[in-house]
Image (tube, rainbow, N blue to C red):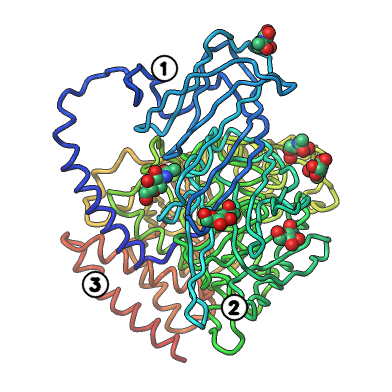
C-alpha cells in the first residue's frame, strides 16, 4: 500500500481526532465498572474467547466465496464455505466478522454432508464471532467445512466492500463496487480469519449484471449465462490481499516479456490515459521476476484506477488498485513529476507481490517488513528500469523526512506491538515506510549490494507462501553463502563459499570479524530514534561517540539508547570508503596517516547524523570553498542537513555561540557553490 499525501492525512487526522474525542465523550460514562469481566455476546451469553487475536486451534485452508453485489440497491449478499483444519480438539470456531448479517451457518463433513448445527455468538467490540458446535467435538487432525450465508450494505467508507461512483461527461452517475481490505476490513466483506498469518487459497465467484464486468485476484475461469463469473483458485494468501470489483470499466492489455497478461482498467472515458501505466508495469514486472529470481505466480496482473480511493494504491495480489491520479497519465496534460510518481507507485505495488504477498509479516507489528521493503525497492527498480527519471536523487529526501519524525520524543520503533484495528492503522506511517527503507539502504551499503541481494532472495525463496518476523530476515542475511538451491553464478563476486563461511558471515567484505546482522539491525528496529555521532580528530586518532539525537531535548538524558552504527568515511588522503562498526558509546579508530579533512557517513547511506568537534567542520568548509566536487552531491546535502539539525539541537545551550557562525558560513558557501 502507498500512503496518501500529507495534507490529506492531516485533514483526515483532524477529522479522526474529532470523531475520537466525540466517541470518548460518548463512552466515558460507560467505562466506570471496568474490571476484567468476561466478554458478553450480543445475545447476552458469555463470549467464549477473550482476546482480539484469534486462537490457533483452527486453521483455514480454502475459501469458496460467492459474492453477489447489487449496484442499484447498494447492498450485497454472499456465501462462504471455508475448509478448516483442526489443530486442537475444540467445540468453538472463533473468527472475524464485522457489520455482516449472518443468516445461515452449518458444519459440513469433508464430503459436503451436514455434520450438525452451530450456534452463532457475536462480539462486535472485538469484531469477532464464535460458532459453537452443539454435540460434535471438532477433533484435532480432522478437516471440516464451515458454511455461512451473509448480507450487508456496501460500505459508504473507503474500506471493506465499498461503493464508489463516477460521473460521465454527459453527467450520468454510475456506481461501482470495490474492495480495500488492508489491514483489517476483509471481515467486513465476508466472515474470515482476518490475520495475515492465516493464509489460504481462495476460489471466488461473483454475480453481476450484463453491463458490468467482475475482477478478482485470479483470472476468469468461466462466465455462465446468469452472469456469475468464476475465478480460478488463488495461490495461498492472506485475507487482506483478497479483492474484487464490479464495474463497467474498460481495459487495455499486453503481455510482459515473461508472458504475464497485464491489464489496466479505468472508467470508460479515461481509457486513453492507461497506456503509460501498462508499459511501466510490464517493464517493472519483468525486472522484479529477474531480480528476485522468482516468477510472478499468477497468470495475470491487473491495475485498476478507482474514482474514490483513500490510500494511494493497494497491492492486492493480481488486482492492484490505485487512485486515478496515481495511475493515469496523459501525454498532453500530465507533468514529468506525475510520471515519476506513477512509476514509483507501480514499482511499490509490484514489489509487494513478493514482499508482502508471497512472504507476509506474521502480524502488523512488523508491517515495515513489507512497507519498508516496497519503499526501498521503488528506488532500486525504477533506477534500473527508468534511469532517465534519476530517481536516486530523491532517496536522501526520504531519509531526511523519516528523521524529521524520528527525532521527536513521540516516535516509535520500526517494529512496535499493536493489537486493535486503530493501532494497526497507525503503523502505516513514515517510520514503517521511510525509516524502514533507509535502514535497509544502510544495511545494503554495509553488506555490499551483491551480498544484500543474495540475502533477500534467499529470504523470499525460503519463506514463500509463509509468514515471517524480523529475525527471519536477519537470519537470511547472516552467513551469506550460496545455498538453498540459489544460482551461484548470479553471485560469483562472492568468491568461494568456504572462505566466506570460515570467517563467519559477511566478514569477507569487512574488517570486523564477527558480523551479527541481527545484533546490528535490532538496534535500528526495536528502539526508536537515531544516533548523533560525534567525531573528534586528534592527529591519527579519531575519537567517536554516539548518543540519541532528540530534537529539543538535553541529549545526556537519553544515555540508555545505544546503536550498532555502521560508520563509513572518506578522508583527504583516501577516496576509498572505509568502514567501522561503532558498537559502544565511545570508541577510537586510528588512521594510517594524518588527514586534512574527514567526512563520515559517505553519501549519507547511514541513518545517523554527524557532528565534527574541534576544527572538523572548519576543514570541511574549507574543502567546500576550494574544491567542492571532491564531495558527492549527497555528501554535500548531508552536511547541510546535519548542520541544520545541529543548530536546532544546540539552540538554548552554550554551544550555540560556537556553531552559528559556522552554520551560516557553510550554508552561504554551499548555496554559492550550488549556483555555479
Ligand atoms: C461429524 O464429524 C465427526 C468427525 O469427523 C464424525 O465422527 C461424526 O460422525 C460426524 N457426524 C455426522 C452427523 O456426520
Ligand atoms: C442496509 O441499510 C438499510 C437502511 O439504509 C437497513 O434497513 C438494512 O438493514 C441494511 N442492511 C443490512 C444487510 O445491513
Ligand atoms: C439489483 O436489484 C435490482 C432491483 O431490485 C434488480 O432488478 C437487479 O437484477 C439486481 N441486480 C443483481 C446483480 O442482483
Ligand atoms: C475452472 O472451472 C472448472 C469448472 O467449474 C473447474 O473444474 C476447474 O477446476 C477450474 N479451474 C481452475 C484453475 O480453478
Ligand atoms: C493453494 O496455494 C498453493 C500455494 O500457492 C498452491 O501450490 C496450491 O496449488 C493451491 N491449491 C489449490 C487447490 O489450487
Ligand atoms: C485477466 C482476466 O481475468 N481478465 C478477465 C477479467 O474479467 C473480464 C470480464 O469479467 C473478462 O472479460 C477478462 O477476460
Ligand atoms: Zn505498500
Tell me, for residue 48, which label it has, or none. 1
Q: Is residue 581 left or right of residue 30?
A: right
Asked whether 408 or 469 is in front, the reply is: 469
The single residue placed furthest to the bottom in the displayed view is 676
Q: Tell me, yes or no, if residue 441 can be seen here.
A: no
Tell us which disc is closer to us: 3 or 1: 1
Determine the secondary structure under disc 1.
Answer: loop
Tell us which disc is closer to us: 3 or 2: 2
Residue plotted at (69% across, 70% down): 251
Q: Is mark 1 within 8 Å of ligand 1?
A: no
Please give the residue where the numbered disc 3 appears in the rendered image: 660
Earlier along the polypeptide chain: callout 2 or callout 1?
1
Please give the residue where the numbered disc 2 appears in the rendered image: 270
Asked whether 554 or 259 is in front, the reply is: 259
Image coordinates for residue 22, horizontal then vertical, percent: 19, 48
* Crowding near the residue tagged with mark 1, few <14, some 14–19, many ≥20 C-alpha atoms within 10 Å: some
Determine the secondary structure under disc 2.
Answer: helix
Image: 51 above or below 426: above
Amino acid at each position: 500500500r502507498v500512503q496518501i499525501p500529507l495534507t490529506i492525512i492531516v485533514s483526515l487526522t483532524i477529522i479522526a481526532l474529532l470523531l475520537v474525542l466525540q466517541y470518548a465523550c460518548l463512552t466515558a460514562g460507560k467505562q466506570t465498572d471496568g474490571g476484567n469481566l468476561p466478554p458478553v455476546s450480543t445475545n447476552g451469553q458469555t463470549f467464549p474467547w477473550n482476546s482480539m487475536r484469534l486462537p490457533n486451534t483452527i486453521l483455514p485452508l480454502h475459501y469458496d466465496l460467492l459474492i453477489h453485489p447489487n449496484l442499484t440497491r447498494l447492498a450485497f449478499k454472499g456465501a462462504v464455505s471455508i475448509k478448516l483444519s483442526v489443530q486442537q480438539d475444540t467445540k468453538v470456531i472463533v473468527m472475524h466478522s464485522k457489520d455482516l448479517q449472518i443468516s445461515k451457518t452449518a458444519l459440513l463433513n469433508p464430503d459436503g454432508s451436514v455434520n450438525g448445527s452451530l450456534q452463532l455468538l457475536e462480539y462486535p467490540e472485538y469484531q469477532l464471532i464464535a460458532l459453537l458446535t452443539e454435540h460434535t467435538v471438532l477433533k484435532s487432525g480432522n478437516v471440516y467445512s464451515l458454511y455461512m450465508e451473509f448480507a450487508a450494505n456496501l460500505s459508504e467508507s473507503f474500506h471493506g466492500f465499498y461503493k464508489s461512483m463516477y460521473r460521465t461527461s454527459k453527467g450520468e452517475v454510475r456506481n461501482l463496487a470495490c474492495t480495500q481490505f488492508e489491514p483489517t476490513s476483509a471481515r467486513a466483506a465476508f466472515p474470515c480469519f482476518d490475520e495475515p498469518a492465516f493464509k489460504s487459497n481462495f476460489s471466488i465467484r461473483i454475480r453481476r449484471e450484463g453491463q458490468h464486468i467482475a475482477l478478482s485476484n485470479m483470472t476468469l475461469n468461466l462466465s455462465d449465462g446468469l452472469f456469475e463469473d468464476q475465478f480460478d483458485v488463488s495461490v495461498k494468501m492472506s485475507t487482506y490481499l483478497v479483492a474484487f470489483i464490479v464495474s463497467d470499466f474498460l481495459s487495455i492489455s499486453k503481455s510482459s516479456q515473461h508472458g504475464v497478461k497485464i491489464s489496466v482498467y479505468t472508467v470508460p472515458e479515461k481509457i486513453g490515459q492507461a497506456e503509460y501505466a501498462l508499459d511501466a508495469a510490464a517493464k517493472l514486472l519483468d525486472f522484479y521476476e529477474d531480480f528476485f529470481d522468482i516468477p510472478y505466480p499468477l497468470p495475470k496482473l491487473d491495475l485498476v484506477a478507482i474514482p474514490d480511493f483513500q490510500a494511494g494504491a493497494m497491492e492486492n495480489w493480481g488486482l492492484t488498485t490505485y487512485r486515478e491520479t496515481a495511475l493515469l497519465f496523459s501525454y498532453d496534460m500530465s507533468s514529468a513529476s506525475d510520471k515519476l510518481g506513477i512509476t514509483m507507485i507501480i514499482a511499490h505495488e509490484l514489489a509487494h507481490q513478493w514482499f508482502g504477498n508471497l512472504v507476509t509479516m506474521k502480524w502488523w507489528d512488523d508491517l515495515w517488513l513489507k512497507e519498508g521493503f516496497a519503499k526501498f525497492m521503488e528506488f532500486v527498480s525504477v533506477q534500473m528500469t527508468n534511469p532517465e527519471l534519476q530517481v536516486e536523487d530523491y532517496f536522501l529526501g526520504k531519509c531526511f523526512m523519516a528523521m524529521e519524525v524520528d527525532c521527536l520524543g513521540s516516535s516509535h520503533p520500526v517494529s512496535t506491538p499493536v493489537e486493535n484495528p486503530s493501532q494497526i492503522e497507525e503503523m502505516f506511517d513514515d517510520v514503517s515506510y521511510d525509516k524502514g527503507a533507509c535502514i535497509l539502504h544502510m544495511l545494503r551499503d554495509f553488506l555490499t549490494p551483491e551480498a544484500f541481494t543474495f540475502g533477500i532472495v534467499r529470504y523470499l525463496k525460503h519463506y514463500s507462501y509463509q509468514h515471517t518476523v524480523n529475525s527471519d530476515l536477519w537470519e537470511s542475511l547472516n552467513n551469506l553463502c550460496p545455498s538453498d538451491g540459489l544460482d551461484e553464478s548470479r553471485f560469483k563476486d562472492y568468491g568461494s563459499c568456504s572462505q566466506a563461511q570460515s570467517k563467519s558471515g559477511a566478514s569477507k567484505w569487512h574488517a570486523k570479524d564477527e558480523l551479527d546482522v541481527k545484533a546490528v539491525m535490532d538496534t535500528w528496529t526495536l528502539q526508536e530514534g537515531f544516533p548523533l555521532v560525534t567525531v573528534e580528530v586528534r592527529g591519527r586518532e579519531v575519537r567517536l561517540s554516539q548518543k540519541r539525537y532528540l530534537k529539543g531535548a538535553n541529549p545526556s538524558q537519553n544515555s540508555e539508547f545505544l546503536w550498532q552504527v555502521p560508520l563509513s568515511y572518506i578522508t583527504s588522503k583516501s577516496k576509498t570508503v572505509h568502514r567501522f562498526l561503532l558498537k559502544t558509546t565511545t570508541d577510537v579508530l586510528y588512521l594510517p596517516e594524518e588527514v586534512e579533512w574527514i567526512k563520515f557517513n559517505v553519501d549519507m547511506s547511514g541513518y545517523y547524523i554527524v557532528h565534527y568537534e574541534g576544527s572538523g567542520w572548519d576543514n570541511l568548509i574549507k574543502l567546500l570553498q576550494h574544491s567542492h566536487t571532491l564531495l558527492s552531491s549527497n555528501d554535500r546535502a548531508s552536511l547541510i542537513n546535519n548542520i541544520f539539525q545541529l543548530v536546532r539541537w544546540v539552540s538554548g545551550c552554550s554551544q550555540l555561540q560556537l556553531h552559528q557562525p559556522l552554520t551560516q558560513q557553510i550554508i552561504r558557501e554551499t548555496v554559492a557553490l550550488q549556483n555555479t
